[in-house]
Image (cartoon, rainbow, N blue to C red):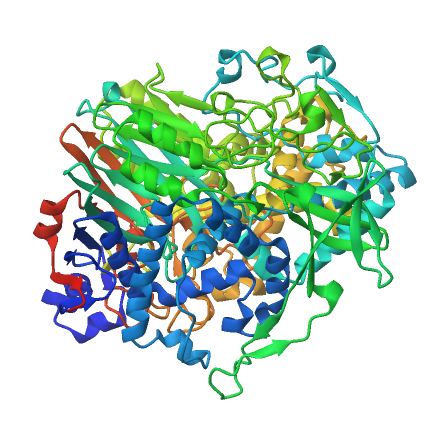
Amino acid sequence: MARIPRFSWYLKVPSAVAVLIFVLFAVPAQAADFNLPGLSGPVTVYEDALGIPTIRGDNESDVVFVLGYLHARDRMFQMDRDRKGAAGRAAELLGSAALSSDVQFRNLGLERAALDTWQVLGDETKGILQSYANGVNAWLAANPLPPEYTALELTRTDPWTPLDTLLVAKGLGAGFSLGFGDVDNTVALGTYQAFGDALGFDGVALFFEDTYRVQPPDDRLTAPGFLAGIGGVGQASVETAGTDGGKAESGITVSGDQRVPDTMLNLAARYRATLDAAPGVEARLQSAEMLKGSNAWVVSGEHTASGYPLIANDPHLTMDTPPIFHEAQMIYDRGDGQDWHVNGTVVPGTPGVLLGCNNHACWGMTVNPLDVTDFFFETLQTNALGLPTHTVYKGEPEMIRQEFNSYFVNPVGDGIADNIEKANVGYTAGAISLIVPRRNNGPIVDIDGNTGLSVAYTGFGPTREVDLIRGIDQADSLESFAESLEFFDIGVQNVYYADVLGNIAWFATSEHPIREDLASLTVDGLPPWFIRDGTGAQANEWLPVMNPQPNQSLPFEILPMAEMPHLINPEQGFITNANNDPIGTNLDNDPLNQLRPDFNGIYYLNAGYAAYRMGRVDREVKSLVARGGVDVQDFIDLQANVQLLDAELILPILLAQFDGAPPGSPMAQALDVLSTWDYSAPTGLAEGWDQGDDPVMASTPDTTEIRNSAAATVFALWRSMLVRNTIDATLTAIGLGNELPPSRVAYNAFKHHLLNYPTAGGVGASGINFFSAGLAATVQASLQQALDLLASEEFAPAFAGSQNVMDYRWGKLHRIVFDSTLDTDPFDIPNGGGFMDLSPELPGLARQGGYEAVDASSHSARANTLNGFMFGHGPSRRFIGHMAPGGAEALQVIPGGQSGVFFDPNFASQLPLWLTNDYHDLAQGQADAVASAQSISTFGPAN
């Protein structure tokens, strides 16, 4: 098997030492001793070959001071970008291109929420935040800024403050939970209704039943039976007949006008256009096309080879350079005389481990899709200038609070350093924010005369993220860990837990508001995943708090923790989750036909979930448990799994539509590789990065990998053509080509109609036929179109016009660029960090993976261009923990390196491990840190 070097620098060194380059290159420079004002005692820092520090001090305050110092050293530009981005000040750093997004973020008000949060924090937490800020500022005072500032013509930046840490935390939480799906759904439903009225089809059914289905495409759940277990009613099972989804049988009523008024539709469409003109907004927040996700699973000791629990977690966030996480271990005395260590991943700008392990336990998180944002259609009173002064609720005016905004821009490229200029932004274009107290102090986002849109979000008020992180970091029992989760106010996460006593657990978190109508067993008007009525004509408000929960922050009624999905030491001995429907509320395509215990309202969580990753994870974990003797290697293999479940579920149906093909033709070749495909998606390239590859020397792939790679390529284009020839073509033919569902939603709809074809013949509930040419003809034509496209000029840089299916290597299309904020070399990887593009015409690194693979690397289901299959979201941390009685034994890796400085030895030192699904050991305690230390630094109080 031929072996070739992956890196150009390899050719310049003797082959005997080349394999050591990464380790030697990654050794940090020897550090000096530091004496800094703000420290109360000595702190020692041990850094390993990857630059991962263990920070040992007498108390938490001193340790977080040094953590802040090291974060500034490694990630100052990232921290500055994140605080300014959340505050709506990114243009001061990045220039005029960021101004449109600044206007939206300033109006949304995360900075207002951060200020409110500071007011509710206790003195101890405020002190920790100040110590961290002092550490950041100590580095700023003594060191030059990172090279990005030079590129942006800046020589200084603002000192770090505790408010900045709260902004980073608020921005991270909003990225998981604040989205604009209500607006998009309202535009689509209103448009479908209008076209249906004009053309004689059922536009409501077209939306709810035929296209924007909330039923997941696979039915695996985390906790089946949970709702019945807490005394709820109407647990979802199989799809029910009738348009009410079984509501009548549950005592649920539907009232009010469920049509989208023209005024609401116009406002929603205009606000959508505003968001489209500010692409930085949805890049930071949730997007319907590319949802943030994650995987996690935990298996109890009764099923493992060692007899102790195993836990795995990999959050899926943007694959940027530098990575979103930084690694660190902190060791300090909690006040009980015991050395307490906590180790894992930290968000730069914050003073604690978000995901990791301590003396007692390990934990991980996955996004828990939860509907915590509502948009409202408001009636407004205006002044003589046309500016709204009041909203009107049940005929009574309610005062709007006005806040004035000023914007500043860095005119990058004028050759003058630090000349920040004031931007001219009109009153109604962002210079004034109009705050509605009734909406949890949320803003009005669009105005049309005496009507407008407002938004309510659980994160617009004071929340306690820092108390959450400190609590879980220091939790020494399952009970204290669970109590800490009471401070998990925003961020909508599933939290997974395993400890040295053998406990395993899962908790769905975040404060979830109770809607007024749902509390009365009614859906009044449009349901919560649309713009709702804010005038009081319909009962759509968030209920004011009546039953305050422990450590509650939101001033509205919330779902009690006991009713939030959770499992503690389940009888089955394992827990799995991948952003899926946790308990089955959506399995019948209706998330509003379950009831809370004691008939205390409709049990509603969310109207959409992922499914395919969970489907694979759950199947594999159940298989491993049935086999027994589960070990760490099993978890490694599962995190690296790239078998595409969507293909496994529908490919047999698709292949059954063929009676053969001319021997030797591309069609015959395609059918051959697809018929023997194991559904995996390897690169098929020596230059590709696949699980188990050597990170330095590339190897020629074998025949099996090549065949699987070719099958993955053909199926990816076939999937696209199937969606385009059914859902897209049908909607376009009736004039709805501008209102196509997001690709993930459209593909789910395609699968629904495919499975229903034997009984419905392709005809949906709307009366529209989505397989107008018939099933076999559509499937066959779509595959032929895929093959023609692969041989076309569009894909010539990858396949040179070849019609030989074996040439269609998946890695030529499935590539990744780890983008920097400046989006240019040498800040990007490749061509920074020693990595090279696959070719000048094929940017990025070839990487295994694909649509909704467990080893997350998804792309649009509609992708049909040379660069359309590239991906930009994936595992921002891979972690596996083995919970031995003496303490955790853990593995971890991040996609890049500790440093964000492109010429630092640890800019990309972990990336070869990440690309080949390998890991490094996670130090647990001081002895591990000392044993792996490559440099030792001491910090002490100023003389």
In-image side of 672 versus 22 (left or right): right
Q: At 48% across and 25% down in the image, what residue appears?
A: 561
Residue 46 in the image: state x and y as whole percent. 14, 56
Q: Nearer the viewer, residue 645 or 548?
A: 548
Question: Which quadrant: the N terminus?
Answer: bottom left
Quadrant hosting residue 880: top left
Residue at image point 42% right, 49% down: 874
Q: 387 or 820, which is in the foreground?
A: 387
Left or right of 797 on screen, residue 534: right
Q: Is residue 345 left or right of residue 386?
A: left
Residue 384 falls in which quadrant of the image?
Answer: bottom right
Please name whichever residue, 204 or 930, is drawn nearer the observer in this view of the structure. Answer: 930
Query: Can see residue 93?
Result: yes
Note whether 537 is above or below 666 in the view shown: above
For the point 41% across and 77% down, the residue is 156
Tally of marks: 0
Q: Quadrant of the C terminus?
A: bottom left
Residue 423 placed where, x, y %? 64, 75
Q: x and y percent of residue 373 in the render? A: 62, 41
Q: Indicate left or right for 417 with 46 as reference.
A: right
Residue 844 at x, y percent in the picture: 42, 63
* Residue 665 in sight in this render: no
